[in-house]
Image (tube, helix red, strand yellow):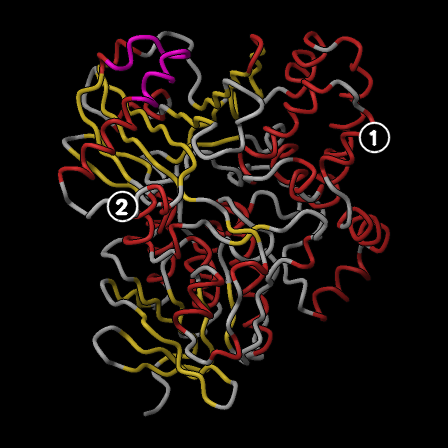
């Protein structure tokens, strides 16, 4: 059989969609195969009884209108390139933290307000607070001036190094530094160091010592520049817009067509095999799946197998999607919250509660007088393996666990239990089933001591098989996988002889 496309993308998650849209806009014929009947993966939306819920992500960077030439407003630049508009509304607070010992702080868009709030709580650490967060600003200043591209693209690295030699050297040095160890250069108070840990854990799912300083600079500094912006209509507006841009330039998304295997001949990816038995060939294949799903399931050759222990595995989630009486949300309540009751258990399964109420920003997501609440905690498939899917015992176990989380959440939102009018629950098994994620995981994490260059990149050991998504550099989060999609598209396009223009 001949090639039916130049590039095949496995999965319509944000990384895969971004890569596909940029390649198609460049004139490289691309086709996406998506298991589900909708795009977005964990950045999708779904509706129930008039409520629209974010399936996963709800804190979004990258929509700044900042005119700087760097990489941190990628959504704005991508959609501008595609000629597509996504309407957003700014959120003045990234996360409101509710922590042990009565420690409450809102990570405001206003950087001065945020730092002053920390200094008020820790007056003896005022100078250390300023110095640590200045380090993150320095990383941001570098990144915001460098164009996005692949770390494996020698032409890109040569170009950037030639145009920005000093900043390139500075970024290279910071690449090997840890967020937590940097914090400990300036700060001694253990409670404040715990807070910096949860600043990291809230988006990287690791403590600050395990988190590269460069990653922290992207999120924790950009919230005070580009800020947090919520897409009107819910998280699903982002993948829907990427699909519109992709199709506008002639791309094809084939929904409800699951890729079960990657065709590898003589060490080279040649195409994919679908669940229907159809085989589709292409010059290159891009996988949006986790590193384990790609090499332990879709690539059958055991020589390419990736042991689970090579990286830490990000956990999965137990999620509650609630439709509630709007009166339970008080005036002035922030959209995003993190609740920790005990520092000793914050990084254990279920130890931290994540909470959002996006209808505060976009009332159209719920019927009049109602609100959407999305609350979730880390979880693993092993906690639910003993229940048969669809059984009464499984349903009852989910209800009991949800009730316990709701009871804990009432510490920040009294009366929540009595306000619930609709409840949709999802376990890690749900993530595994719908998103084809091994054990429901959200990708590979670096082990303590590893640096970001040891993260899986866009190239793989199989020739012409490329990777994007949360298993690849830079990691978890919508803006991170967007970056991986941009760098992957840049690498593939250059290898095909039609390099992308910088965004």
Q: Residue at x 49, y 56 (%)?
A: 469
Residue at far front of view: 386
For residue 135, above or below residue 115: below
Q: Nearer the viewer, mark 1 or mark 2?
A: 2
The span picked out in magenta is 404-417
Q: Is residue 76 at least partly visible in the picture?
A: no
Q: Is residue 422 left or right of residue 27?
A: left
Q: Residue at x 24, y 33 (%)?
A: 397
Task: Using the image as rendered, state which of residue 25 and residue 148 is in the foreground.
Answer: 148
For residue 218, above or below residue 404: below
Task: Please rate how many residues cluster around mark 2, counting C-alpha atoms within 10 Å: few if below 14, some from 14 to 19, many from 20.
Answer: few
Q: Quadrant of residue 380?
A: top left
Inspect the magenta stretch and tell me whether residue 18 lies in it.
Answer: no
Whole-Å distance between the Cαs marked 1 and 2?
46 Å
Q: Upstream in the sequence, badge 1 or badge 2? A: 1
Which element carries disc 2, helix, strand or loop? loop
Q: Which mark is residue 211?
A: none
Which element carries disc 1, helix, strand or loop? helix
Q: Which mark is residue 386?
A: 2
Residue 488's spot in the image, x, y percent?
55, 64
Q: How many marks?
A: 2
Q: Residue at x 52, y 45 (%)?
A: 479
Question: Label 1, on which residue?
Answer: 185
Task: Please rate how many residues cluster around mark 1, counting C-alpha atoms within 10 Å: few if below 14, some from 14 to 19, many from 20.
Answer: few
Residue 79's spot in the image, x, y percent?
46, 50
For residue 46, above or below residue 118: below
Residue 347's spot in the image, x, y percent?
54, 33
């Amino acid at each position: 059989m001949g090639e039916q496309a130049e590039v095949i993308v496995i999965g319509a998650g944000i990384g895969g969609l971004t890569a596909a849209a940029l390649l198609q806009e460049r004139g490289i014929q691309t086709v996406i195969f998506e298991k589900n009947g909708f795009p977005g993966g964990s950045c999708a939306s779904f509706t129930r009884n008039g409520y629209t819920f974010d399936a996963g992500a709800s804190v979004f960077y990258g929509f700044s209108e900042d005119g700087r030439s760097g990489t941190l407003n990628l959504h704005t630049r991508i959609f501008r390139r595609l000629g597509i508009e996504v309407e957003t509304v700014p959120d003045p607070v990234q996360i409101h933290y509710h922590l042990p010992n009565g420690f409450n702080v809102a990570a405001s868009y206003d950087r001065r307000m945020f730092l002053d709030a920390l200094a008020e709580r820790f007056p003896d650490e005022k100078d250390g607070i300023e110095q640590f967060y200045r380090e993150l600003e320095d990383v941001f200043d570098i990144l915001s001036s460098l164009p996005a591209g692949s770390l494996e693209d020698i032409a890109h690295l040569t170009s950037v190094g030639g145009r920005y030699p000093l900043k390139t050297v500075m970024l290279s040095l910071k690449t090997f530094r840890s967020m937590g160890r940097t914090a400990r250069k300036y700060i001694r108070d253990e409670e404040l160091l715990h807070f910096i840990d949860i600043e990291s854990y809230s988006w990287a799912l690791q403590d600050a010592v395990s988190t590269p300083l460069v990653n922290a600079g992207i999120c924790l500094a950009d919230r005070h520049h580009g800020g947090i912006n919520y897409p009107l209509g819910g998280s699903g507006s982002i993948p829907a817009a990427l699909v519109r841009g992709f199709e506008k330039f002639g791309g094809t998304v084939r929904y409800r067509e699951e890729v079960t295997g990657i065709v590898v001949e003589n060490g080279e990816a040649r195409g994919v095999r679908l669940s229907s038995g159809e085989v589709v060939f292409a010059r290159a294949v891009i996988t949006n799946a986790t590193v384990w799903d790609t090499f332990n399931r879709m690539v059958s050759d055991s020589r390419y197998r990736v042991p689970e222990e090579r990286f830490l595995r990000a956990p999965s989630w137990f999620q509650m999607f609630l439709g509630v009486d709007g009166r339970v949300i008080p005036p002035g309540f922030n959209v995003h919250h993190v609740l920790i009751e005990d520092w000793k258990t914050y990084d254990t399964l279920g130890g931290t509660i994540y909470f959002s109420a996006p209808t505060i920003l976009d009332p159209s997501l719920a019927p009049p007088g109602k609100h959407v609440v999305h609350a979730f905690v880390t979880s693993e498939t092993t906690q639910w393996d003993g229940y048969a899917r669809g059984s009464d015992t499984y349903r009852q176990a989910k209800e009991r666990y949800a009730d316990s989380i709701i009871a804990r959440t009432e510490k920040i939102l009294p009366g929540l239990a009595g306000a619930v009018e609709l409840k949709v629950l999802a376990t890690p098994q749900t993530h595994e089933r719908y998103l084809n994620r091994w054990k429901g995981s959200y990708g590979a994490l670096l082990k303590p001591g590893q640096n970001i260059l040891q993260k899986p990149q866009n190239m793989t050991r199989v020739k012409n098989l490329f990777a994007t998504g949360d298993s690849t550099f830079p990691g978890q989060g919508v803006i991170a996988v967007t970056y991986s999609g941009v760098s992957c598209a840049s690498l593939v396009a250059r290898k095909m002889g039609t390099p992308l223009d910088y965004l």
